[in-house]
Image (tube, grey):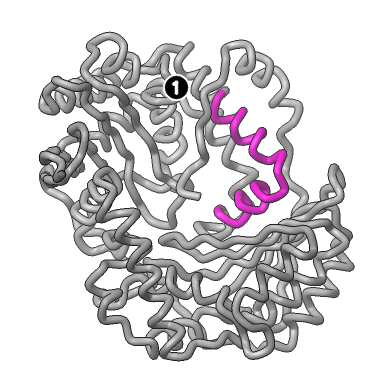
Amino acid sequence: MSKIKIIALSPLMVLLLALLIPLSVSAINVQEHVLDNGLKVLILEDHKAPTATFQIWYRVGSRDEQIGKTGLSHLLEHMMFKGTKEHGPKTFSQAIQRAGGTDNAFTTGEYTGYFELLASDRLALPIELEADRMQNLVLTDESVLSERDVVMEERRMRYEDDPQNLLHEEVVAAAFKSHPYRWPVIGWMSDLKTLNPADLRQHYATYYAPNNAVILVVGDVKPDEILAKVRDAFGKIPAGPSTKAVSVSEAEQYGEKRVVLRKEAELPVVMSAYKVPAIHQEDGPALDVLSNILSGGKSTRIYHALVYEKQLALSAWAGYDGMHRDAYLFYTGATAARGKSIEDVEKALVTEIEKISKEPPTDHEIQKAKNQIEATFILEQDSFYMQARLIGSFEMIGGWKLVDTYLEAIRKVTADDVRRVAGKYLVPEKRTTGVLIPLETKK
């Protein structure tokens, strides 16, 4: 999860939720245990439905890779579904589906996670299967290279053939000079082409170990029973080698960077990225509120100014991507309306940023943004899966107990805090701008 997702709510819904939320928010009652081999287990008991999610997250993502070997974490996620010594290819998902459940996985810059959602009385199945593939994955040269080709095709479809995604990738790569955030989770195509299966086997042996993993169980469960099953399945797996979290200080940026991408596309697009602190760092909450004031719905500043008032853009937005261990990015962007100059669109975006950096937002804007953030935060926790994702995301960037402090920090943000962070971080010397210039579509 890159950030807490913001949804557009009606004024009535915002008002009702604003009244209800103070009564609903309380510390989450997570039980934490650590096995002798270093495996952390987080259990949240909730009996509102007879289901549960079992998730296992590994503290490894694209930030733990090296130049020339990017994409290993994402490829390994693919390989985790290709079978173990005991269970053949596709067996894992088929077994979960036969039990009436669903399963999937995700890789980010910070972590790799696997999850199952099914009836709570059937959790023994994913516990057994996840313990098996933590230690017994089959990674032959042939199987690795075959799946590597699948990932290369995925990359072609998602990036090379998608101009806006490719623009985003180019902007992020240009924004970071020394931090591994500069390469994409899926990896560079040049690295995938030359991938050595031995490197993937080493990646698996290093990072897929109990002392580098966190298990999350949320739902209709009895914690003691679940802990006993987890201990039986995972307790005998030996701890892996000690891993040290990648610690990189991003080099200072002294001026705006620009990227021009010429690609077959329908309309011009502009995207700017500003380096900003992460959500758990100082000024993170104020940046989260700022993003909602600028782009928390069609009535907020950027969309209203560029799409409705000036009619320069078909879409316009801002977003704070703060769910990272280290400082990351705050985005603004827009797609030009047909016949409109992308230069005028970019100027209009900058104008809105300059306005809020000089004059604080109104009390109404501040309260509306806070209400939206709180409403989304509460509504998402109605899902066992999203509860686990929320706990896991905070655990990976600084500790799951940050969940309890998130809304408190949001509530303390003032209008002047928003103006101050806009003037401090959304400035030209911290900005990387990318422009997509459409080429004529080939017949």
Where does the image place residue 371, in percent across and percent down from the top left? Answer: 57, 23
Q: Is residue 44 shown to the viewer in this render?
A: no
Q: Which residue lies furthest to the front in this view?
A: 443
As displayed, is residue 273 above or below residue 304? below
The answer to which quarter of the image holds residue 15 is top right
Magenta stretch, residue numbers: 372-393
Q: In this view, does 221 lie to the left or right of 43?
A: right
Per the image, label 1 sits on a secondary structure element best described as loop
Seen at 12% across and 48% down, the residue is 254
Q: Would you say residue 105 sits in the magenta stretch?
A: no
Q: Is residue 418 left or right of residue 86?
A: left
As displayed, is residue 430 above or below residue 58? above
Seen at 83% across and 67% down, the residue is 226
User: Front-most of 81 and 414?
Assistant: 81
Q: Is residue 373 shown to the viewer in this render?
A: yes
Q: How many labels does the image show?
A: 1
Q: What residue type is labelled 1?
A: Gly
User: Front-most of 81 and 230?
Assistant: 81
Q: Residue furthest top?
A: 309
Seen at 15% across and 46% down, the residue is 263
The answer to which quarter of the image holds residue 340 is top left
User: Front-most of 342 and 355?
Assistant: 342
Where does the image place residue 394, in percent across and percent down from the top left? Answer: 56, 53
* Residue occupied by mark 1: 297
User: Front-most of 348 and 414?
Assistant: 348
As displayed, is residue 179 above or below residue 431? below
